[in-house]
Amino acid sequence: MADAHPPRHPDRIAVRGLTAHAHHGVYGFEREQGQTFSVDAVLEVDTAPAAATDDLALTVNYADLAQRLHGVLTGEPVDLLETLCRRLADVCLADPLVQAVEITVHKPQADLGVPFDDVTVTIRRERS
């Protein structure tokens, strides 16, 4: 027998391609010179209350979120993209409306010694 109310897929709000010059990396030249990084943040949020009332207070203000993510991206340098991803995810999950987040950090100018298009690390974190 089919469930009368199948599970609903979560709504998503995404900020993609947020870009900044930053100084993350293991190597000294990465810390000194810096390079371009970009971030994709995909948030799982129940948008129904905001949609029903047309009230920004009932959803994630993605302009404010972008400013906070940019602050982390250009903030204190870290060695690993994994650490940067975690810091960015923590910013997203600080908003009580965010149920889960997927963060991807792009480092297209990494020095791999061979031709490549992009290096990324992606994590997914849920509210505990």
Image (tube, grey):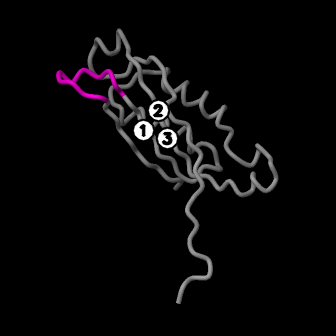
Instruction: Tell me how far mark 1 sits from mark 2, CA to CA.
Output: 6 Å
Which residue bears the numbered disc 1? Answer: 104
Q: Is residue 57 above or below residue 64?
A: below
| Magenta segment | 107-117
Label 3: which secondary element: helix
Counting residues from the start of the chain, the first of labels 1 and 2 encountered is 2
Magenta stretch, main secondary structure, is: loop
Task: Judge whether residue 111 is colored magenta.
Answer: yes
Measure the C-alpha gap from mark 1 to mark 3. 10 Å
Whichever of labels 1 and 3 marks the residue nearer the N terminus, that label is: 3
Residue type of the residue flagged with mark 1: Thr
Q: Residue at x 52, y 28 (%)?
A: 18
- Residue ID for mark 2: 39
Residue at figure coordinates x 75%, y 56% from the top left: 49
Amino acid at pointer 2 = Val
Distance in Å between CA atoms under marks 2 and 3: 11 Å
Find disc 3 in the rendering and name its residue. 89
Give how far across and how far down residue 32 sits, in percent: 35, 9
The reply to whether the magenta stretch includes residue 3 is no
Neighbour tally class for label 1: few under 14, some 14-19, many 20 plus, Cα within 10 Å: many
